[in-house]
Image (tube, rainbow, N blue to C red):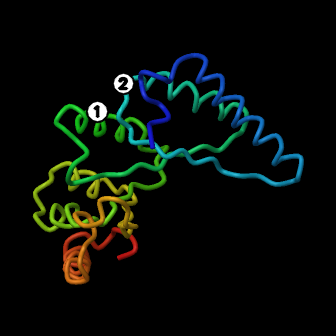
């Protein structure tokens, strides 16, 4: 849990730590004659986009391939302010995002089928790779676990309305 680029922790020291960790890991992999792509999972709810962009730019000067994954929720995650921040950042970092996932919890399925989230529609229509991920039960399983019927209904809905999502 937690956000790698949260405004209250992503300072110059953390920037240096990330830079060191990624460049040293890349150097060790290169010694083996291998290469890799680094992917950071971020919720994109932060204000310091310039510092994050500077990190990506500096890593790329070292020929390090770095990308982002992020996620979208229909229920429980965003308030109006954080959703605006997310949408601003998802657009700003569009070329750096390899996929956007939606975990198929019961509340998210209900949100998908309501089909009234303008931001989700905007992301879908903008061509982001959206991956519908199955929910792995944890302490909120009673509320979050979808029924087989809900999964059937959401995949039928996705096929009809959002056929370019994955794994649809």
Circle 2 residues within 10 Å: few <14, some 14–19, many ≥20: some
Q: Residues within 10 Å of mark 1 (few under 14, many from 20)?
A: some
- The answer to which of marks 1 and 2 sits earlier in the sequence is 2
Observer-nearest residue: 111 or 119?
111
Q: Pick out the residue farthest to the top.
A: 12
Residue shown at the point (16%, 36%) measured from the top left? 80
Residues tagged 1 and 2 counted as in contact (Cβ below 8 A): yes
Rendered residue at 61%/18% (across/down):
13
Give the label on residue 27, or none: none
Residue 123 image position (x, y, % from top left):
28, 52
User: Where residue 136 appears, x then y in whole percent?
Assistant: 40, 67
Quick one: 113 or 135, which is closer to the camera? 135
Which residue has dot 2 on it? 47
Residue in the image at 47% along x and 31% along y? 5
**Please, what secondary structure does the residue beneath circle 2 have?**
loop
Image quarter of the C terminus? bottom left
Closer to us: 110 or 117: 110
Q: CA distance from mark 1 to mark 2?
A: 7 Å
Depicted 93 relative to depicted 51: above or below? below
Residue 75 versus residue 159 in the image, above or below: above
Q: Quadrant of residue 87?
A: top left
From this view, report whether residue 43 is shown above or below residue 152: above
Question: Could you say which quadrant of the image residue 40 lies in?
Answer: top right
Q: Position of residue 137 (x, y in %)?
A: 37, 66
Residue 83 horizontal/vertical position (percent): 23, 39
Residue 55 vertical placement versus 155 (above, below): above
Q: Quadrant of residue 101?
A: bottom left
Q: Which residue is mark 1?
A: 85
């Amino acid at each position: 849990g937690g956000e790698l680029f949260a405004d209250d922790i992503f300072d110059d020291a953390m920037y240096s730590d990330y830079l060191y960790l990624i460049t040293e890991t890349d150097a060790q992999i290169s010694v083996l004659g291998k290469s890799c792509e680094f992917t950071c999972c971020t919720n994109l709810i932060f204000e310091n986009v310039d510092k994050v962009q500077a990190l990506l730019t500096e890593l790329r000067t070292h020929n390090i391939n770095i990308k982002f994954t992020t996620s979208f929720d229909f229920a429980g995650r965003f308030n109006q302010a954080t959703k605006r921040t997310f949408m601003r950042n998802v657009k700003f970092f569009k070329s750096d995002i390899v996929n956007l996932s939606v975990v198929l919890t019961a509340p998210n399925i209900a949100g998908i089928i309501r089909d009234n989230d303008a931001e989700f529609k905007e992301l879908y229509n903008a061509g982001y790779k959206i991956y519908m991920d199955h929910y792995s039960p944890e302490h909120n399983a009673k509320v979050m676990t979808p029924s087989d019927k809900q999964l059937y209904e959401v995949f039928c809905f996705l096929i009809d309305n959002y056929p370019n999502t994955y794994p649809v």
